[in-house]
Image (spheres, coloured by chain):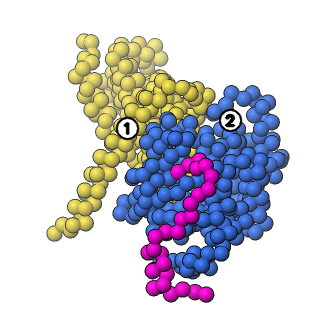
Chain colours: A blue, B yellow
């Protein structure tokens, strides 16, 4: 069933449907406002990330989904609002102070963002060499363990350029989680992947979640993938959270906006 | 009649220039702040010294040798008409150590290293590797900018000293072969002409140029947008800007030296 523009506009202008979160918030965004020049990206974005959950984050193209993730790790500063992590408002921290936060919140870039002049091994060793006093043997053991987890054993000496897109994303994921962060931010991890590699990456996300018990935000356009791995789903519209509920409730939602979004209809 | 666009462009250029000057200065202060705080990436700095210094050596050698030889030839035949052939070693030594060595070496390094740093850092920026450095809890100023800045500040004056000697050596070869002078005469007269302040000037100028080349290249690289084309634009911009800076600031540095460091009579 499709909805008319008038119906949709009526629906999206209603107060957002945000179900109360059950559990202990590990990271909270409060009234985040962010603009780039005259373009307002976030206009009072607020939500809690609950410990141990995977939250899928939807929104149209160019609506600032990746900016939310970048703001959550301090790569972007919001114009106003606060982001609370372990009782600290990270929007007020300096670049030096953010170093401690970034050991606990990790960001998995859409394209992996691997250091292209370093081998897979050196990429994975980077956070350990920077932040730990592990011996070379311990680093070696940890890297081998991670390569086994992502199914890339034996690729230590390869340069990123010789890996496929899916492999690069998996190495990027391994590099981000090697420090055992509390929160993982996935920026469109399945974008551009074929169904086989998409499933591989989703399995990896589930394995990481099961093994480390960390909390994750998963920005995506890929609705089936989000339904497969997410505990809750957030849909952003007009710079705010329009819908935030459990995956089951979002699937069953009668809200015309949600139905239109899930049916892939364009929302202006 | 001049259009509004003309003035808008002038205004945009002016604002862009101010932003660049402010940005590079701020980056310089950030580097100064980070210089004394751990962690220290000594290995990265040594690697950069190798890439900037050792790998530029052959280019600097060939250029200095060729320039020195041509200068000696030109001075020799030019001054011969006025009976001034014997002054070639003195004129060459002063011109090379004060101007040609520092300026030519800096221009070569600006082209080779300035473009290299911008292309590398710019590519890292457009592929989100700089963001990855930050996201992994490390500071790009310490990891990217400081090693390149320190390496350029150390190696460019050293390359200049080598260029001075190699250029004078080239000049000597020509004066011996073409003008019939002896090597002893050349070096005695060259050393006679030079004072300590000339050597200080020869070291100080490339030191200033090195700071500008490295900071400009890193600053522009870290702000590169627009994919491969953006990287190309940034690289060209850095080579042009640093070359112009070297040529223009050379005059003011020379003037300042003449005013504040008078040569002994």
State the residue at coordinates (75%, 56%): A206
Choose top left, top right, bottom left or bottom right for residue A119.
Answer: top right
Q: Horizontal and vertical percent for residue B108?
A: 47, 38
Left or right, A231 with reference to A238? right
Left or right, B139 with reference to A123? left
Circle 1: element type: helix
State the residue at coordinates (64%, 64%): A246
Whether tag 1 and tag 2 are in contact, CB under 8 A, the answer is no
State the residue at coordinates (43%, 29%): B33
**Residue that carries the numbered disc 1 in the rendered image:** B26
From this viewpoint, is residue B161 visible? yes
* Mark 2 chain: A
From this viewpoint, is residue A171 visible? no
Image: magenta residue range: A1-28
Left or right, B264 with reference to A122? left
**Which dot marks residue A128?**
2
The residue nearer to you, when weighing A217 against B207, is A217
Q: Horizontal and vertical percent for residue B150?
A: 49, 29
């Amino acid at each position: 069933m499709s909805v008319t523009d008038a119906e949709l506009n009526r629906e999206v202008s209603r107060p957002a449907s945000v179900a109360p979160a059950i559990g202990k918030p590990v990271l909270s965004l409060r009234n985040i406002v962010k603009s780039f020049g005259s373009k307002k990206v976030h206009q009072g974005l607020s939500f809690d990330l609950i410990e141990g959950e995977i939250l899928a984050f939807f929104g149209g193209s160019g609506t600032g989904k990746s900016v939310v993730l970048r703001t959550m790790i301090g790569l972007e500063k919001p114009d106003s609002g606060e982001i609370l992590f372990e009782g600290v408002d990270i929007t007020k921290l300096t670049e030096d102070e953010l170093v401690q936060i970034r050991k606990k919140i990790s960001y998995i870039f859409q394209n992996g963002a691997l250091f292209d002049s370093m081998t897979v091994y050196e990429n994975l060793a980077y956070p350990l060499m920077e932040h730990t006093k592990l011996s070379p043997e311990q680093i070696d053991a940890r890297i081998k363990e991670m390569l086994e987890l992502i199914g890339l054993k034996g690729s230590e000496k390869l340069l990123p350029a010789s890996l496929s897109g899916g492999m690069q994303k998996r190495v990027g994921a391994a590099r981000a989680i090697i420090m055992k962060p509390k929160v993982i931010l996935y920026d469109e991890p399945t974008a551009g992947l074929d169904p086989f590699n998409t499933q591989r990456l989703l399995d990896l996300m589930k394995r990481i979640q099961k093994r480390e018990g960390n909390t994750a935000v998963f920005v995506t356009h890929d609705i089936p993938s989000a339904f497969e791995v997410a505990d809750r789903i957030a849909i952003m519209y007009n710079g705010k959270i329009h819908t935030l509920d459990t995956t089951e409730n979002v699937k069953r939602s009668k809200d015309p906006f949600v139905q239109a979004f899930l049916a892939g209809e364009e929302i202006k | 009649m001049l259009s509004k666009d003309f003035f808008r462009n002038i205004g945009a250029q002016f604002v862009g220039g101010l932003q660049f000057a402010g940005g590079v200065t701020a980056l310089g202060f950030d580097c100064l702040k980070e210089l004394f705080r751990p962690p220290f990436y000594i290995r990265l700095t040594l690697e950069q010294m190798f890439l900037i210094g050792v790998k530029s050596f052959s280019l600097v050698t060939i250029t200095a040798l060729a320039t020195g030889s041509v200068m000696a030839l030109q001075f020799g035949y030019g001054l011969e008409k006025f009976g001034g052939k014997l002054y070639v070693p003195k004129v060459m030594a002063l011109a090379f150590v004060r101007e040609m060595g520092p300026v030519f070496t800096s221009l070569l390094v600006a082209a080779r290293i300035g473009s290299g740093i911008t292309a590398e850092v710019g590519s890292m920026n457009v592929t989100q590797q700089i963001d990855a450095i930050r996201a992994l809890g490390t500071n790009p100023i310490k990891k990217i900018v400081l090693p390149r800045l320190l390496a350029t500040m150390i190696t460019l004056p050293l390359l200049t000293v080598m260029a001075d000697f190699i250029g004078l050596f080239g000049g000597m070869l020509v004066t011996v072969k073409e003008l019939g002078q002896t090597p002893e005469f050349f070096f005695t007269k060259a050393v006679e002409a030079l004072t300590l302040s000339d050597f200080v000037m020869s070291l100080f100028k490339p030191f200033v140029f090195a700071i500008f080349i490295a900071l400009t290249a890193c600053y522009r690289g870290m702000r590169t947008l627009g994919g491969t084309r953006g990287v190309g634009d940034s690289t060209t911009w850095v080579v042009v800007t640093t070359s112009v800076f070297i040529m223009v600031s050379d005059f003011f540095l020379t003037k300042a030296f003449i005013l504040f460091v008078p040569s002994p009579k």
